[in-house]
Structure formats: structure tokens, C-alpha cells
Image (tube, rainbow, N blue to C red):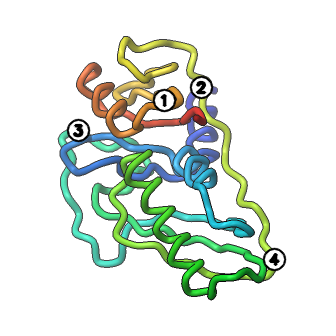
Amino acid sequence: MDGIRAVRRQLALGRLLPLGGARDGTWITEAAAGAVLRHTPLPRGVRLGALRVDRAPGAPVSPAPVAPPPSALPAGPLRISVEMATGLGDDPLPVVVGRVREALVGVAEGRVGLVVEGVDVRVVESVTEARGGHAPELSGSLPVPGVRAASAEGAVTWIAVAAGARVLDVARAAREATGGAVVVAAVDRD
């Protein structure tokens, strides 16, 4: 039963996105990254809809120093695709879209530590919120600054990152401490 539960949890969390560069050997769940990106400060009147992070088309695959967890995307640059709704404002739509792109890249690279090649924005009239999965129960601990909770499953350590910490830096430190693959399952909001 534990194996079935682990598979269900993995599916609910979505894919695992490469965190940092190929040498980092760290990943973040699509749900955790999406939660952070959804709280990106945006221009007034802008709402985000469907959001997805994929490998950038034609991006080279870089080998990781540890075996990637199941469903992990290979290390390499990513592309964010997002739908947005906006009301009429003072700025032209291309300017607003440019600001949304800049804001998302800033949070993805600066706060999370994703390597982003670009952002595709689709402007829609009505948007439905994307639903993420539930993070695994992280009942253990790991003596690494910025790790709020942790849980190990085989060769993979799942962590929750505390508010205010840079996700990639914490994940790198956790990987150094464990020696295996690290997946960020949750990121506390600032």
C-alpha cells in the first residue's frame, strides 16, 4: 500500500522541475514552483490563470551528479507558459505583458533558482485557476538552514523550504548534507 500511496502523491504533485544547474542534483515539484510563481508581484489589474513550466524547446540535456527521481525533467533551461487576464489600464498591452514576463523571470530565478530561458504569455478574457497537488507529509527534520521539514524515501529526500530562504541555496545545502537527490515539495510564503 505504501508504494501506491507514493505513486499517487507523486502524480498529485506534478512533474519535478530541475532546480539550478546540472551539477546541483536538485529538483522542485511543479506544484511548489507554481505556488511561488503565482505570488509574483504583478502590474495592477493582472490575474494569472493556467501556469506551466516545461523544458525549453531544443534545450540540451545535461547529466546530473545523482540519479534523478522518477518523473524528473532533465537538467536544462525551462520555459514558463502562463495565461493572464487584465483590465484596461493606462499602459499598452505589450508593455503590461513585458512587465509580467520580467516579474515571473525575476521570481523564478531570484526566489526559486530555476534557470528560465523565456516566458510565453497568452492574454485571455476569463481564466480558471490551475489546481496543484498536495505536498507530501514532511514529518522529519534535516539540520540544514532554511529546511523547515524533511522526509526521506529511498534515495530521495523531500524538503519544505522556510519563508525568506532562497530555494536553490537550501536545496543545494540539503543535497550536500544527504548526498542524494533532493526534491522541494513546498515553499513557505514570505
Disc 3 to disc 2: CB gap under 8 Å: no
Q: Which residue is mark 4?
A: 126
Disc 1 to disc 3: CB gap under 8 Å: no
- At mark 3, the secondary structure is loop
* Amino acid type, callout 2: Asp
Decide which of tag 4 and tag 3 comes sooner along the chain: 3
Is 91 or 58 nearer to us in this picture? Answer: 91
Is 97 or 144 nearer to us in this picture? Answer: 97
Q: Which residue is mark 3?
A: 66
Is 46 or 31 nearer to us in this picture? Answer: 46
Describe residue 129's horizontal placement relative to residue 82 as left or right.
right
Q: Which residue is mark 2?
A: 2
* Amino acid type, callout 1: Val
Q: Identify the disc placed on residue 48.
A: none
Disc 4 to disc 2: CB gap under 8 Å: no
Q: Which residue is mark 1?
A: 161
Decide which of tag 2 and tag 1 comes sooner along the chain: 2
**Vertical comparison of 107 with 124: above or below:** above
